[in-house]
Amino acid sequence: MQPAPNPKPPLEFTAIWNLSFGFAGIQFGWGLQMANMSAIFEYLGVQEQNLAILWVAAPVTGLLVQPIIGYCSDRTWTRLGRRKPYILFGAIAASAALIAMPYSPFWWTAAALLWILDTAVNVSMEPFRAFVADVLPESQHTIGYTVQSLLIGLGAVLSSALPFILRQGFGIGASTEGPPERGIPLNVQLAFLLGASAYLGAVLYTIFTTREYPPPDADAFRRRQAESAGIPAFFRETIRGIAHMPSTMRQLALVQFFTWFGLFCMWLYFSVAIAASIFKGEPDSPAFERGVDWGGVCFAVYNGVGLAFSFVLLRAVRYLDPKYIHCGCLMAGGVGLASTGMVSHPYALFIPMIGIGIAWASILSMPYAMLAPSLPPEKMGFYMGIFNFFITIPQIAASGGLTLAMHTFLGGNRMAAVILGGFSIVIASFLVLSVETSQAPKPNPSPP
């Protein structure tokens, strides 16, 4: 294991694209899950008041898995690389779960597969965040995360709209296995199969086209491996890392909490809320299926806006501090999501989706652009995993809190939960102004 002569030379835009392309596949699988899992649970007989608690799999697995994977990947070097083994293993496991998910005969089968899928996605996702910071010099971190946001948008647009396209474009959509009121529509089944192929294929493309650099000091790396081996060392490092986390991470914690609480409200209830309130459907009706498909179209719209707005961010970061960009984008998303309850026509939903898409592009890039320069390079994966706490904890809070709220003062009103999510994101937009960034925005040396 020899050190690279120039560990982090600037990369051309094509190389940055290749580096991040696997995230399009990860988002393809994750987007299918976000747009369809609540409907799958309702197709299998789960009541709307109990949806939130079944979604707790996602944040709990992220809370547990990402710090462990980050810690381990910081201390890994193989012929395949440092982050690549974890990214590949997660992609294989997630693809298998995606294939099995739409054939779930019972709600508890779907819930178990959701745990497996979320665990695998987290195994892939966390090393990918660190992978960008590993390969790119600091001057290209912002563009790297912005390109990642662009590709996430690409994968999400395709995955969110896929069930609608299969139903409207190809006439695929009749419920299949099981009693009619419990069948998962055929278009959803096929979409998940295609999603599994897209996930694995995109990850393999990045693995084969991107080089990882070995540790610059092999002896020091091996010593650190030996000193930090074992579970006790991991817990010591975690406690120490949380106690001494960079101030920028501390300040971003509240921003992330309110942002991801709001997003989780949307993912949990948006599709089923519009299916019930705008399409006037129940889970066993064709109107409900059309509403859920239209929810996927709305998700495709906001992801498409996020994809397009990523190009704006590529230019904006050259002139503006990321925190001011993030503040404005979160405000647009929060107001857009909160206004969903005033919409009565399916096509009018595209208007709030514009604001949500602007926020989504920023959420996927600006917090990491603010955070990465403050992190020690040798602990990049570990701290990216710790940073995920501030994504998963609000989702866990939402899973428990929304279940209680839906049974009590929200009275099972799905749309009220969506509006609550919008107000949460508005709060986050004000909180981001308190974040002290460690550097001014740098010119992009390799603009697209």
Image (cartoon, rainbow, N blue to C red):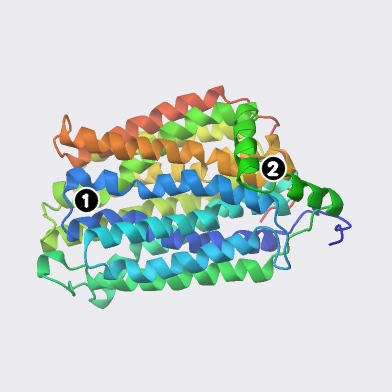
Query: What is the distance, in whole Å, between disc 2 and disc 1 at their CAs?
Result: 41 Å
Rendered image quadrant of residue 39: bottom left
User: Badge 1: few (under 14), some or many (20 or more) residues near its Cα, within 10 Å?
Assistant: many
Q: Is residue 273 above or below residue 398?
A: below
Q: Is residue 84 above or below residue 265?
A: below
Q: Which residue is mark 2?
A: 379
Q: Which residue lies at the image location 38% right of the left edge and 45% below the top edge?
A: 354
Specify whether residue 297 is in view: no
Rendered image quadrant of residue 240: top right
**Where residue 89 appears, x then y in whole percent?**
55, 65
Specify whether residue 279 is in view: yes
Relative depth, front residue between 187 and 402: 402
**Where residue 64 appears, x then y in whole percent?**
49, 45
Q: Horizontal placement of 239 versus 52: left or right? A: right
Q: Which residue lies at the image location 33% right of the left edge and 37% below the top edge?
A: 398
Q: Which residue is mark 1?
A: 272
Q: Secondary structure at mark 1?
A: helix
Relative depth, front residue between 106 and 300: 106
